[in-house]
Image (spheres, rainbow, N blue to C red):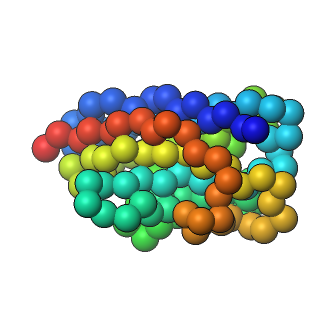
Amino acid sequence: QVQLVESGGGLVQAGGSLRLSCAASGRTFSSHAMGWFRQAPGKERECVAAISRGGISTYHAGSVKGRFTISRDNAKNTVYLQMNSLKPEDTTVYYCAARLYSLSGAVTGVGEYDYWGQGTQVTVSS
């Protein structure tokens, strides 16, 4: 069992920045691939960014490439999503996810993840 707790969401003006954090329970965090997803109302959940267990391999969706950066600190059991140059269309709930004991690189499929956080709301005003 892995518990994921997101934090760092909030209200920001367009062009601003936020850093999301996701703290994971357990002692095997460095064995898990991690991802950040978002889901707008009426739309499917999509992978925003993903990172391999060692942090060597990363993925960023085209819509956020150059603006968002995923990173992880295995010593702190935490994965981050640095979001810069935020746009109103980035407004939605963001979820952290863990794929346990992953030997793959950055994993982007919703169905490939084992545990999910409760989500954190990000609102970007125009």
Q: Nearer the viewer, residue 35 or 81?
A: 35
Q: Position of residue 126 (x, y in %)?
A: 13, 44
Q: Nearer the viewer, residue 101 or 79?
A: 101
Q: Nearer the viewer, residue 14 or 45?
A: 45
Residue for point 83% across, 45% down: 30
The mark tally for this picture is 0
Q: Position of residue 54 (x, y in %)?
A: 81, 53
Residue for point 67% across, 34% down: 3
Q: Horizontal placement of 114 versus 104: left or right?
A: left
Q: Quadrant of residue 8?
A: top left
Q: Horizontal placement of 103 versus 51: left or right?
A: right
Q: Residue furthest front?
A: 1
Q: Residue furthest left?
A: 126
Q: Is residue 71 visible?
A: no
Residue for point 74% across, 30% down: 25
Q: Horizontal placement of 28 versus 3: left or right?
A: right
Q: Position of residue 49 (x, y in %)?
A: 54, 58
Q: Quadrant of residue 63?
A: bottom left
